[in-house]
């Protein structure tokens, strides 16, 4: 443009992205004006230097609530959604490994899960070196009290500067932490800081660092970490600016787990300490002794404990024997039950995603925010072969559909594919991603057209009908219907299969839809119809249904004048009366961290103490936190 361009922002919130690490708080009436140099001024800009790819992802951390926002996110090991749950489940909760019994908090005083939207752009020289272990990421760096604990990595930090590292916790059922199997991959991330060779107490300050702090090999300057400085909401990939993050979102762990719904003497427990001392459920007042699996009564309530045979590995013979004999393997609240069950661990991930408001978490197995998915950030790179598939071998393709990172994945049963197939299997829509869409050379060459072999589900060349009322009642029909990724279709097929197998009572179970939901996913899996029927019956035997279970999407119906819960409501209005919410009075001052069905209105007039005939009112879901909607 021949003119200076004026960009203005007015209002109380800068969209979703607000780098809190810079303590920049937008206020009502704030006007931010950015002047962009005019084009055609006679200055010829230098060509932009090549940079690494920008990755946008949500990252989670389990922590003490009082520390949220107290310190910038540096020198930390953080995780994706599944990774943070795995960390809590395996490192924080096991009662017989902890002490003393009179403690007032969980281990490390963890009581919340925090989520940040990160933007990451790692240094290009790092990404073009052997230090890149996953597309867009460097090696995972472990930190303890502010210090990188692996001395062998200090030379790489001197050469490339700080980076965001990545480590897989699970990339397929055969490649998971043995304590926490999962059908969904999960990961950990590391974010560096200045002076990574010294603990916090010995670093000095950024303005005056310890003279022994690590220096860059290029120019001898001190290594200053990777968190971008004030004003840089998008990282450049240069030294000192490889990641930034936005607003904090915090979820109380006690609410997620259900401790605040337990009885503490005629009232709900308020937190972990209250549950520990005052819960009235006798089944929670037990733990394993740590010797041979004996269970002993205790005077306090236990959030979670696991049989010693399974505490370190779910796959060893001793643990398998305990699981098969029907002995009690776990104690504590229902939310944590089934740590050795990959399906139960995925249910917990979906429960956490739902609690953070991720649409479709408990209807479509969606663990990523829709706006992250819509970015459709590519994975393929001409400089790296990690995401360049061999169509005859079935991969490696790459998908961001699991955690937002480029995870190598495979299509099974191709002409020259391995047996058993490499894991994880790709999402069924992998060929629709812009990296591979329309590229015939990368279309997998399937060994067969049998649906049970899964390959043809990706290419659409399978034999047989996928219509749930016509599909064959065998492994092929199961695979075809599951690929439709529709719970109602799967329930209809399973009802036919159960009736055919003589399981009439199971076929009529009103919770069959919930069981059917867990028989399809983003990626297919090898299984038989017989094993699926067994899984369905095992799920339906859990009473009450396990936490995090399927939530059917109910058709929207406006509330009529005579409908409602029958509780007194207060109509609260904001912004001059143009935004009003009708909230039951008994919810106004409660600690609620879930989506509630309420009626909310846009008022027709600025002053509206009572609903006006011109108001536009609908019933919908609103996130209520501490009485503020």
Image: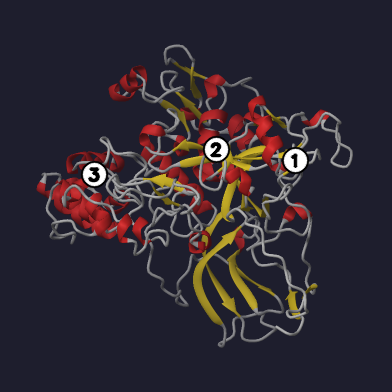
Q: Earlier in the sequence, mark 2 or mark 3?
A: 2
Residue 177 drawn above or below residue 51: above
Q: Nearer the viewer, residue 239 or 314?
A: 239
Residue 314 in which image quadrant: top left
Q: Earlier in the sequence, mark 1 or mark 3?
A: 1
Q: Nearer the viewer, mark 2 or mark 3?
A: 2
Residue at 61% over, 21% down: 101
- The image quadrant where one finds the N terminus is bottom right
Q: Nearer the viewer, mark 1 or mark 3?
A: 1
Distance from disc 2 to disc 1, alpha carbons, whole Å, reads: 19 Å
Q: Which residue, given by chain and number where applicable, does mark 2 sit on?
A: 130
Distance from disc 2 to disc 3, alpha carbons, whole Å, reads: 31 Å
Q: Which residue, given by chain and number where applicable, does mark 1 sit on?
A: 218
Residue at 49% over, 54% down: 368
Residue 274 in which image quadrant: top right
Q: Earlier in the sequence, mark 2 or mark 1?
A: 2
Is disc 2 placed on a helix, strand or loop?
loop
311 displayed left or right of 174: right
Residue 441 visible in the displayed image: yes
338 displayed left or right of 204: left
Discs 1, 3 touching: Cβ within 8 Å = no
Q: Position of residue 578 (x, y in %)?
A: 65, 80
Residue furthest right in the image: 208
Is disc 1 placed on a helix, strand or loop?
loop
Q: Which mark is residue 413?
A: 3
Residue at 55% over, 29% down: 91
Residue at 37% over, 69% down: 555
CA neighbours of label 1 inside 10 A, class few (<14), some (14 to 19), many (20+): few
Q: Position of residue 224 (x, y in %)?
A: 77, 42
Distance from disc 1 to disc 3, alpha carbons, whole Å, reads: 49 Å
How did the renderer colour the structure? Answer: secondary structure
CA neighbours of label 3 inside 10 A, class few (<14), some (14 to 19), many (20+): many
């Amino acid at each position: 443009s021949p003119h200076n361009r004026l960009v203005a922002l007015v209002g109380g919130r800068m969209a979703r992205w607000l780098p809190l690490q810079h303590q920049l708080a937008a206020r009502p009436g704030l006007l931010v004006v950015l002047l962009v140099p005019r084009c055609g001024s006679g200055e010829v800009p230098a060509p932009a230097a090549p940079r690494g790819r920008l990755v946008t992802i949500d990252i989670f951390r389990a922590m003490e609530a009082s520390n949220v926002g107290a310190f910038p996110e540096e020198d930390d090991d953080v995780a994706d959604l599944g990774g943070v749950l795995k960390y809590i489940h395996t490192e924080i909760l096991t009662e017989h490994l902890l002490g003393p019994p009179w403690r007032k908090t969980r281990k490390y005083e963890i009581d919340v899960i925090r989520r940040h939207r990160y933007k990451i752009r790692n240094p290009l020289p790092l990404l073009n070196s052997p230090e890149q272990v996953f597309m867009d990421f460097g090696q995972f760096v472990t930190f303890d009290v502010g210090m990188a604990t692996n001395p062998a990595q200090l030379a790489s930090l001197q050469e490339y500067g700080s980076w965001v590292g990545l480590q897989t916790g699970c990339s397929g059922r055969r490649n998971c932490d043995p304590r926490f199997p999962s059908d969904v991959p999960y990961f950990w991330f590391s974010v560096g800081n200045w002076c990574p060779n010294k603990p916090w107490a010995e670093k000095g300050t950024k303005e005056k660092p310890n003279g022994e702090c690590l220096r860059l090999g290029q120019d001898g300057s001190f290594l200053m970490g990777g968190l971008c400085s004030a004003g840089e909401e998008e990282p450049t990939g240069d030294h000192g600016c490889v990641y930034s993050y936005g607003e904090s979102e915090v979820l109380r762990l006690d609410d997620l787990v259900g401790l605040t719904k337990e009885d503490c003497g005629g009232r709900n427990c308020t937190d972990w300490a209250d549950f520990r001392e005052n819960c009235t459920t006798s089944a929670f007042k037990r733990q394993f002794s740590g010797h041979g699996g004996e269970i002993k009564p205790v005077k306090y309530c236990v959030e979670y404990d696991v049989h010693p045979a399974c505490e370190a590995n779910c796959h060893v013979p001793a643990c398998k024997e305990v699981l098969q004999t029907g002995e009690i393997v776990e104690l504590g609240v229902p939310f944590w039950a089934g740590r050795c069950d990959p399906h139960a661990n995925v249910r917990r991930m979906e429960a956490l995603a739902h609690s953070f408001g991720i649409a479709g978490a408990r209807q479509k197995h969606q663990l990523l925010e829709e706006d992250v998915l819509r970015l459709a950030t590519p994975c393929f790179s001409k400089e790296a072969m990690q995401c360049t598939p061999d169509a005859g071998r079935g991969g490696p393709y790459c998908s961001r559909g699991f955690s937002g990172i480029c995870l190598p994945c495979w299509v099974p049963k191709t002409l020259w594919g391995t047996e058993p197939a490499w894991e994880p299997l790709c999402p069924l829509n992998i060929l629709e991603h812009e990296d591979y869409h329309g590229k015939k050379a990368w279309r997998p060459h399937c060994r067969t057209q049998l649906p049970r072999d899964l390959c043809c589900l990706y290419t659409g060349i399978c034999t047989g009908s996928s219509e749930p009322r016509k599909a064959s009642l065998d492994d092929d029909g199961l695979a075809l219907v599951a690929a439709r990724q529709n719970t109602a279709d799967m329930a209809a097929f399973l009802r036919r299969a159960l009736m055919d197998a003589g399981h009439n009572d199971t076929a009529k179970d009103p919770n069959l839809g919930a069981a059917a939901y867990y028989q399809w996913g983003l990626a297919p899996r090898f299984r038989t119809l017989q094993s699926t029927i067994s899984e369905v019956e095992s799920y339906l035997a859990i009473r009450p249904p396990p936490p995090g279970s399927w939530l059917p999407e109910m058709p929207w119906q406006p509330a009529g004048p005579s409908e409602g819960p029958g509780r007194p409501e207060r109509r609260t209005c904001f912004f001059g009366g143009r935004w009003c919410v009708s909230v039951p009075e008994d919810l106004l001052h409660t600690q609620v961290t879930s989506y509630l069905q309420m009626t909310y209105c846009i008022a027709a007039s600025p002053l509206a103490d009572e609903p006006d005939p011109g108001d536009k009112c609908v019933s919908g879901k609103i996130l209520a936190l501490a009485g503020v909607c």
